[in-house]
Amino acid sequence: MKLHILYSAGLTRVLFTLVLTVLVSSCKSSSEKSTEDPNQAPSGYELIWHDEFDSGDKPNAAYWSYEEGFVRNEELQWYQKDNASVAQGNLVITGRKEKIPNPNFEADATNWKKNRQHAEYTSSSINTRGKFQFKYGILEVRAKIDTASGMWPAIWTLGVEKSWPSNGEIDVMEFYQINGKPHILANAAWGADWRNVSWDSAKIPFSEFIEKDAQWSEKFHIWKMDWSEDAIKLYLDDELLNEIDLAEAINPDGSNGFQQPHYILLNLAIGSNGGDPSNTQFPKEYLVDYVRVFQKTKKTN
């Protein structure tokens, strides 16, 4: 009888240990830092720039600048530096529900950036403009996004010359709602001005990803842009989402915004296309493990 009790207790401990190991492994797979060596470039390519977010408590000022205030799309958030940090090997962009006075408020203004007395939410948007730019190559970003209502995280690039959209916009990743349903987008935009914009868009219902993996939102994923002088290919976890033929992406003046250097933007917008955040629990976090840029290896004589 004593032997049976000891055996049962031992078996219970073993089972408990196995369950605990599975749970810990699951948590690690969704949140731990990637151990992949950034110098292990795709065949025929070399690493030319990267940020692993491994040091300091703020994004590296040599690489990243901040947008401030109300910026675009009549979004709800006030962009500010305070909402971007570095922790546990990740860039952390935090969306908060908090009231911030608008210093540009004008009671009789028609401009949405001025007629709001307060912002009800805050977030961050960082970019490499003037600090790093590249023309052609592979951009790879490992990130974990929050898919709650109201969230509009993005990974994108803009050309350094001309105004939008003539400079060319590449949306490596956007997550937002279309007709009230969440989607993952992979896009490019160009055109004469904001009234005359051409889009090449892939809009994949988020339900398709959840059907494949119910825990999709709890994990990091890899978004990739493969950009050449002929085409832009946009991938999610090695699945091709969209391919843009650059011969078709010509502005009315004959220029092509995708045949010039681009800089990188990472941001978490709230509201607008992101949907209604009023019933969402804050704070929310958009985590970026790394940003890496590879270009074809230069031939030597």
Image: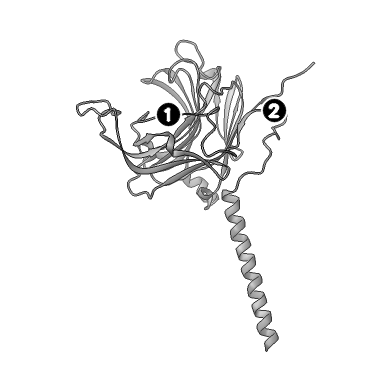
The answer to whether residue 255 is above or below residue 141 is above
Residue carrying label 1: 67
Question: Mark 1: which secondary structure?
Answer: loop
Residue occupying the point 56% across, 38% down: 56
Residue occupying the point 25% across, 34% down: 117
Residue occupying the point 56% across, 45% down: 88
Q: Which mark is residue 23?
A: none
Q: Quadrant of the C terminus?
A: top right
The answer to whether residue 87 is above or below residue 254 is below
Q: Which residue in the rendered view is the most extreme toward the bottom?
A: 1
Picture quadrant where residue 49 is located: top right
Q: Are marks 1 and 2 in contact (CB under 8 Å)?
A: no
Which residue is nearer to you in this view: 178 or 103? 103
Q: Which residue in the rendered view is the most extreme toward the front?
A: 56
Which residue is nearer to you in this view: 113 or 73? 113
The x and y percentages for residue 39 are 70, 34
Q: Which residue in the rendered view is the most extreme toward the left?
A: 108
Locate residue 284 relative to residue 87 in the image: left or right: left
Q: Give the mark toward the camera: 1 or 2.
A: 1
Residue carrying label 2: 46
Residue occupying the point 23% across, 27% down: 106
Give the mark, 1 or 2, whose residue is nearer the N terminus.
Answer: 2
